[in-house]
Image (cartoon, rainbow, N blue to C red):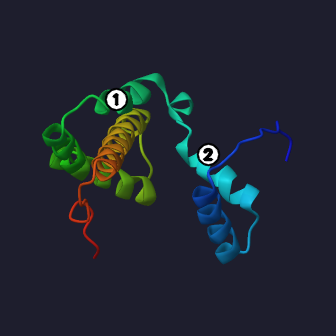
Amino acid sequence: MAGRSVILRLPDPLYERYKQQAEEAHRSVEAVLLDAVTTAAPEEERLPRDLADAVRELETLDDEALWRAARHTLPPEASSRLEALHLKRQDVGLTAAEQEIAAELVRQYERTMLVRAHAAKLLKKRGHDISGLFPRR
């Protein structure tokens, strides 16, 4: 992989944790550390500005507001309309106007899911149990 080298001095206990993870995964310490750095790096630059702004705004919310954001869902009317358009697309296709409506509903759905996921991530990071947010079926 092309890239730049960085010399990083880790405290022995931290290095030993990454070394053990690497051994358990049959990977190199470098690969495990690269995964950790990649995961920690913000990816907002890859999001459209409106989505990046929505995610960034979550950082300033208190826990109560984050719980509301994490529980927010697409309104039932929008969800029903999106499902109906999806079924129609499979059966007979959509008009240009219906395609635009479907695209907008998909954007709303994706935004809702992104905000929910990021709010849950922040709540977990703050020490909350989020297991009830996404019940298993």
Which of the two labelled residues, at mark 2 and mark 1, occupies the earlier sequence position? 2
- Tell me if residue 61 comes above or below residue 132 in the rendering: above
Q: Residues within 10 Å of mark 2 (few under 14, many from 20)?
A: few
SS under mark 1: helix
**Three-letter amino acid code at disc 1?**
Ala
Q: Residues within 10 Å of mark 1 (few under 14, many from 20)?
A: some
- Check the image and name the residue furthest to the front: 12
Q: Position of residue 37 (x, y in %)?
A: 61, 45
User: Residue 54: which numbered mark, if any?
Assistant: 1
Residue 50 placement: quadrant: top left
Residue pictured at 44% horizontal, 34% vertical: 96
Q: Position of residue 12 (x, y in %)?
A: 63, 57
Residue pictured at 30% horizontal, 42% vertical: 112
User: Residue 30: which numbered mark, if any?
Assistant: none
Q: Position of residue 34 (x, y in %)?
A: 68, 50
- Tell me if residue 91 comes above or below residue 8 in the rendering: below
Residue bearing mark 2: 37
* Pair 2/1: label in front: 2
**Three-letter amino acid code at disc 2?**
Val
Q: Nearer the viewer, residue 117 or 86?
A: 117
Q: Nearer the viewer, residue 62 or 83?
A: 62
Residue pictured at 25% horizontal, 69% vertical: 135
